[in-house]
Image: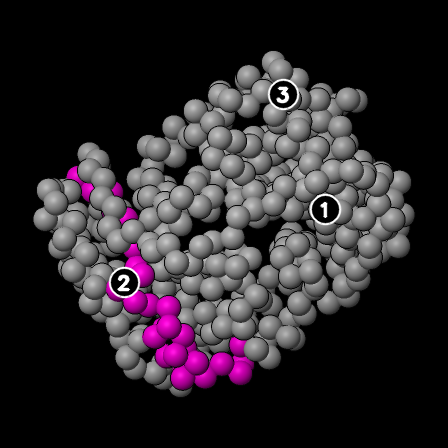
Amino acid sequence: MDVQESRLSSGVRLITSTLPRVQSVTFGIWVGVGARYETRNISGISHFIEHLLFKGTGKRSAKEISQEIEGYGGYLNAFTQEENTCYYARVASNRLWKALDVLTDMYNDPCFDPVEIKKERGVIIEEIMMYRDQPQQVVQEMLSEAIWQEHALGRPIIGTPETLAKMDKSVIKGFKDKAYVPSNTVFSFAGCLDHGECVRRVEQLVSEKSGSRVPGYDSVNRSVRQRDVILQKKDIEQTHMAMGVRIFGRNDKRRYALRLLNVILGENMSSRLFQVVREKYGLAYSVHSSAHLFEESGALVISAGLDRKRTLQAIELITREITRLKAVSVGHRELKMAKEYVIGQLKLGLESTTHQMMWIGDNLMSYGRFIRPEEIIDNITAITGRDILALAEQIFSGARASLAMVSPDIGDESDQGKYKAILDRI
């Protein structure tokens, strides 16, 4: 990969990956702020601001913003996470500078029109209601609350109708002005481009800002225990469950062993959970695991939509696979397949300008440097079965596991004890 980094006079960090044989460019503006930077009374403000930046600037209406990208076949989008927010576009390479002007205009000069704020608040509230109608989303929010307790990581990124109601223009603009400063921003580009020209153009469009204090966040208190079981009764067809443990942060060297452990446990169709819960016993359509790493903490999560009549059997099978992962070292063939999968996925991602932009931008935001594919491959290749066994022993403990469940068949308090007893056997 032909990757170059620069720090601009404004304080912006800029990173590019040059792919001369493609005809497009994906670029993103990353801001180091997200849901964990919010206090409870303004929960959801980062996501609200993400929406509002599309609603018009001093020189462009909302319609003009989309037309200037989509009018030439481009794609424009954004997302808010726990620790950052990203606005990005993919365009034909000859339209890059126009698209760059549009996104930096959104970043520099959003209107925050009170009429649009009121309208967009209603849109987001409908988004919240949509998620509340999706039990697979509800159960993830329940699990986050169980794992993180009162910490901001346990609150929904989108906020609540009550917190959104408190946000007027002054609150929104005040938060945006503190967070959206060059020293807290990364510009990432991938595609047919020239690094020097990207530097020159961004230098022209983004000026230094002084005197702003970027919002901070509270670290996770590791002494606060996770809640064990949270159950919610809902008139649906399936049982939706999510089980999780709090783990280490993204800078921990064990993250490479975790990557492989997650693949073996439940990331793909070859994984143990998929082969046992779905293929062997037919108890679920969807069952998978995922790892989420933040600055100083993280979570490993198992999720499934289960046959409501055989929920207990399914959860017992899931915990049995966790116990097996702790007790028996992964075999050579299974470990080799997991490594080949991770390395193959890495290489497939290199074919996409959007994937490369996301990768290099997230690297700079999260690690302060670009992590080359060769470094990742070397670390993955070096992991042994004993490394995964040791990691499984370290992170899985009944005293630290949480289970959230939404089901039509939730009964009395005896259900709580029944599922807690299963967790205690991990």
- Whether 401 is among the magenta residues is yes
Query: Residue type at mark 3?
Result: Lys
Query: Residue type at mark 2?
Result: Ala
> Measuring 49% from the left and 25% from the top, which residue is drawn there?
164
Q: Give the magenta range.
A: 380-408
Q: Which residue is mark 1?
A: 185
Give x and y (percent) for residue 209. 81, 38
> Measuring 21% from the left and 64% from the top, which residue is drawn there?
424
Specify the quadrant that holds the C terminus.
bottom left
Specify the quadrant that holds the N terminus.
bottom right
Question: Is 303 situated left or right of 373 in this image?
Answer: left
Write down the quadrant of residue 2 in the picture: bottom right
Nearest to viewer (mark 3 / mark 1):
3
Nearest to viewer (mark 2 / mark 3):
2
Mark 1 vs mark 2, CA separation in Å: 40 Å
Write down the quadrant of residue 238 in the picture: top left
Q: Which residue is mark 2?
A: 399
Q: Earlier in the sequence, mark 3 or mark 1?
A: 3
Report the colour scheme: one colour
Nearest to viewer (mark 1 / mark 2):
2
Q: Report whether residue 206 is seen.
A: no
